[in-house]
Image (cartoon, rainbow, N blue to C red):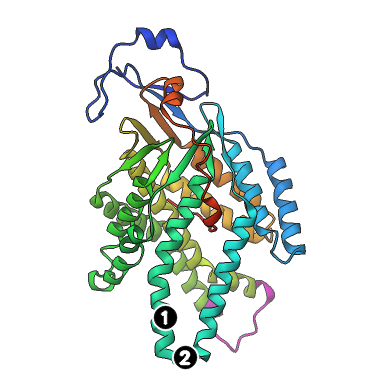
Amino acid sequence: MPERRQNTPGPWDPAALASAPELKTPGLKKPGLKTQVRHDLAFTGDLSSFYRIWLVNTALTIVTLGLYGPWATVRTKRYLFGHTRLIGTGFTFEADPRAILKGRLILLGTLATGAFLPTVVSELDALLLFALAMLVGIPWLVSQSAKFRARNTTWRGVHFDFTGGMLGAMPWFVLLYLALPFTLGLIYPYIRKRQHAFLINNLKAGGRSFETDPSGFSYFGSTIKALVVGVVFVLAPALFVGHFINTQFGDPTTEKSAATLVLLGLASLLPLFSYLSINAVYRAYTRNILFAHTSFDGVHKLHSDIDPLKLGWITLTNLAATLLTLGFFRPVALLRKHRYLVTTMGITLMEPVEGLDRMMTRDDNALGDVGGNYFGTGVDI
């Protein structure tokens, strides 16, 4: 039976489910499931309300010299999560801003201590301590950030959880990077594949697990595609513009007008535009691959249909508009990108929503140890 795609959130049709023939789908683990319906995520937020939130957050953060930042972060995430809907229900973000503030203060204190170390110990000792801090700190921060985000997220009263720890993250987020120079960077796609697998395979919802095992070769192919797109659409034009500017205004003895200086300033941003475009295209390719190989509870399939070129265009135009408006386009950029990423995601459920609700446990104590997880920095996929 072909997949039915349901774009408009709503309840399942019990009569249709009862009469549906049993579906035998290769690779699925559980027998007896009768139908599959794809539900796309929807975003119901609007620019006017989000812009007001951004203005208040920015003003209070400036007035309090950054101390309001955690409250601004939580308020923003609650709006975005609440308006991100699956089957008509929004997600909730329950983080305590005070926990985020504590985490940021700890991180700031750690960085300050690191900067002060060379004044009390030798440079070699300081370098060794820095390397040890990176070896332990990066995987710890990655696992704690993923745990913080998951345990503060709910959907229909069901809590998410993340069970990965520092030791599990260490090989993929620190140790394998040591092999980059010896492999001429060719190992990087494999590193990203293992990082994504770590973040997904340790994620749970209602006691049920997410699982993924994408191909390393597909990640390598995504890297090649992203580099080609970046070279053709951004890097090559950037080099041409740079050469033109250098030939026209390269003489240091020539007096330059204000317009010329502005043009030179914009040209200096071209490498940044190139990097962001390549990164956006690469993220689009890899997330499509990752979601295509990801399931929930072994049977419910995730989907991602990002157009890499469109995401690259959104990223570049968002940056350009934000710079030209001196930052006032920032909330528009955030909402524009979030809306696109959300609405290109979906999940194919292999049983009625009501059955899924009963299957997933609701643990009211799931947030009991969040107080020790201060770092809500998040890890992008």
Q: Which amino acid, by three-letter code, is at mark 1?
A: Leu
Residue 236 visible in image: no
Q: How crowded is mark 2: few (under 14 residues within 10 Å), some or many (20 or more)?
A: few
Task: Reply above or below: 41 against 103.
Answer: above
345 up-or-down from 176: above or below: above
Question: In the displayed structure, would residue 208 be above or below residue 219?
Answer: above
Q: Residue at x 35, y 24 (%)?
A: 350
With 357 as the anchor, is 302 left or right in this view?
A: left
- Residue 121, numbered circle: 2
* Residues at marks 1 and 2 touching, judged by CB atoms closer than 8 Å: yes
Callout 1: SS: helix
User: How many numbered discs sit on the rendered protein?
Assistant: 2
* Residue extent of the magenta highlight: 248-259
For mark 2, give the secondary structure: loop
Residue 127, image x, y percentages: 41, 84
- Amino acid tagged 2: Val
Disc 1 marks which residue? 129
Specify the quadrant of the image occupied by residue 15: top left
Q: Is residue 178 visible?
A: yes
Please tell me which of labels 1 and 2 falls first in the chain.
Answer: 2
Q: Position of residue 285 (x, y in %)?
A: 36, 48
Q: In this view, does 111 lie to the left or right of 136?
A: right
Give how far across and how far down residue 220 sits, in percent.
27, 55
Q: How far apart are marks 1 and 2 (CA)?
A: 10 Å
Could you classify mark 1 by the number of other residues whose Cα lies within 10 Å: few (under 14), some (14-19), or many (20 or more)? some
Q: Quadrant of residue 84?
A: top right
Task: Name the foreground residue: 368 vs 237.
Answer: 368
